[in-house]
Amino acid sequence: MITIEEKLNLFSKHVFEEIRGASEEKIRKIEQHNKEQMDAHRYKIEQEKKAYAEEIIKKEKEKNDKQISQKKGQIKKEIMLEKNKLFNKLIEGIKNKLTIFITTNEYKNYLRNILENGLKEMSNKSNIEVKISKYDIKNNKDYIKTIILDNGFTNVNMLESDEDIIGGMILLDKSNRAILDLSLLDKLEQNKEYIGKMLYEALREGEEIEK
């Protein structure tokens, strides 16, 4: 069975390929536009060198070096903003893929697996509460209840999560407020660092190819 981490990785690749081209083009245009500006600025400096005395040239060079440094910082900031926008689009795209995933039979098998494992971890608890998504309340409530009963738990309260957890569930021991988060939202949050690393490495490879 494919793990949810592998599923997230697959979704990440699919969504990334869909939006990568447009973002890389934006980044390329930003870099090209600012390169042209810096080249024009450097050309202006070279022309002015011929007309000014040595001391004046020195002062102008210091001034323009500072301006170029500031411009480089601005370019770096613009590119980072674009990369952050791409990352947010990627995460939203993965969420959309997950909302499709929860409608499949594969998701039902995944539900059974995580719920049975979660109940094993809570086996010594007597007052368990299961929070599930709005979708699962409507479509999988009886299925989840059957799994709970099949695993020997009869005193389990099931309710809709206040937060949009996408899918999966959150198990709580009401006696001591112990929480076991098995939601798809939590899985996505846990994998954000990996997804971001994958994204920025792919963009870096694209930049190297362009060079």
Image (spheres, rainbow, N blue to C red):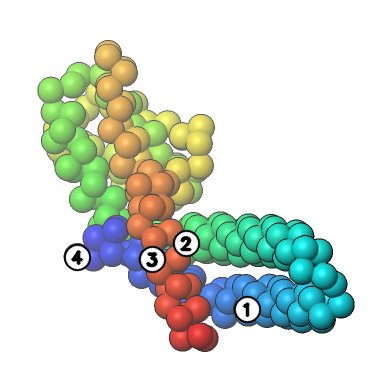
Label 3 element class: helix
Residue identifier under label 1 = 28
Horizontal and vertical percent position of residue 30:
68, 73
Marks 2, 1: nearer the viewer: 1
Q: Is residue 25 left or right of residue 108?
A: right
Q: Residue at x 21, y 38 (%)?
A: 118
Residue identifier under label 2 = 94
The residue lying furthest to the top in this view is: 175
Choose the circle earlier in sequence order: 3 or 2.
Answer: 2
Label 2 element class: helix
Q: Amino acid at mark 3?
A: Met
Choose the circle earlier in sequence order: 1 or 4.
Answer: 4
Residue identifier under label 3 = 198
Residue identifier under label 4 = 1
Horizontal and vertical percent position of residue 78:
66, 61
Marks 3, 2: nearer the viewer: 3
Choose the circle earlier in sequence order: 3 or 4.
Answer: 4
- Can you say whether 93 is above or below 48 in the image? above
